[in-house]
Amino acid sequence: MSSDAARDLDAWIPRLIQVWRERRAARSGGNRSGGRNRPFVDDGPADRLTPPEVKEVGAGIKRLSHGLTRQRELAGAKYMDDPQLLGAYLLFYWPVSYAQSRSLFSELPARPRSLLDLGSGPGPLAFAGIDAGARETIAADRSKPALELARQLAIAASESLGTREWSPERPLPEGTFDVISMGHVVNELYDGDVGRRAALLEQVLTRVKPGGSLVVMEPALRDTSRALLAVRDVLVAKGYAVRAPCLFRGSCPALVKPSDWCHAERPWRMPTLTEALARAAGLHKESLKMSYLVLAPKGEAWAEPPQGRVFRIVSEALEGKGRQRYMGCGPEGRVGLALQDKHRTEGNARFFHLQRGEVVRLGGATEEKGDGVGLTDATTVELVARAGQALPKP
């Protein structure tokens, strides 16, 4: 997450707290006006929650987290119409989704001028798009309370935001857009039906302008990640190109073994609010984890990969006795990459400090092994792109 994105997120925290307190005061029947028909709110500092507020929101976060990650009984349910769950989302998951999407928007080939956020909730991706440069932005969701919160946030930030009611059963909002985003939406649709999910994305892609992108972001859980990769394979087989993160143009090799999946991870400076609420809910958000696809409209070709033998790092460091190992995925597929400590040189030392999501180029001699590629003291390792950074044009 860039320093600009971190600074922008810091500016949103007081607005999230303000809007949450206003909504809570309105529900409790407060009748003193704070201006512009807002209830008067005077219960706490502007940039952080009080201990009773942390406890209250933490309980909602626990409910929401359990319902979306364990038995997933909330997946597909109208949980944003529940005031406690919507408040928990606004104060905890909103900053996380904002930070995740800012990282993904930085991988786009061009800065978006117009953006449609489908399944927006209270708009973290929509506002991330505005902060990334979009001047025409629409948030679309089936939850009226969530859209009302998005409108309140737009007023608090003095930003222009359009809102539309939308669900997959309804027609898409009119118009075409440079970017359409769907954050943590697809995994909750159609009871896992890959064909119907792919058909929806095909429909959405018809509203993406030439040269634009559809950004799909999903939870980094194994099942949700593999489900997204299955949708990817349907679309790739129909001729759609993936802008990111894939360098491999065939069926996803991470689906060969049931135990494998592919997700991204980005470092970030966690806001104090997020840290306090994570601690209250017993969760960990020290890094941003998500699965994602950036898709091109039908008829657009895959971008040419960087020259040479390149791989995107798709695992954490898999340290072994006397060696460093990662999984890499590139134009030739998904393979293990390993370098023994004794073969460390100035030219390959970067290998010992790689991060998930980075793209590297191998030069010089390597050894083909049964479990992948062995780097030697004659191998060079060059960083082509950092995680969250667009690939350079060939």
Image: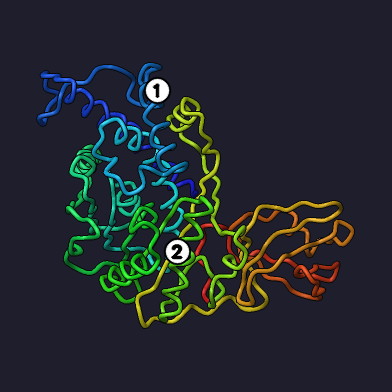
Image x and y of residue 58, in percent? 41, 26
Label 2 is placed on what type of residue? Leu
Q: Please, what secondary structure does the residue beneath circle 1 have? A: helix
Mark 1, Cα crowd under 10 Å, few <14 / some 14-19 / many 20+, is: some
Label 1 is placed on what type of residue? Val
Residue 197 can be seen in this image: yes
Q: Whole-Å distance between the Cαs marked 1 and 2? A: 34 Å
Relative placement, left or right, of 133 versus 35 is: right
The residue located at (18%, 51%) in the rendering is 163
Image x and y of residue 195, in percent? 37, 69
Relative placement, left or right, of 216 versus 29 is: right
The residue located at (12%, 27%) in the rendering is 35
Image x and y of residue 209, in percent? 28, 73
Relative placement, left or right, of 156 versus 391 is: left
Number of callouts: 2
Residue 394 can be seen in this image: no
Q: Is residue 44 above or below residue 392?
A: above
Relative placement, left or right, of 279 versus 372 is: left
Residue on which the image places disc 1 = 54
Is residue 72 or residue 280 the one in the foreground? Answer: 72
Res. 181 image quadrant: bottom left
Q: Is residue 235 above or below residue 40?
A: below
Q: Which is more N-terminal, label 2 or label 1? A: 1
What label sits on residue 310 in the rendered view? none
Q: Is residue 226 above or below residue 47?
A: below
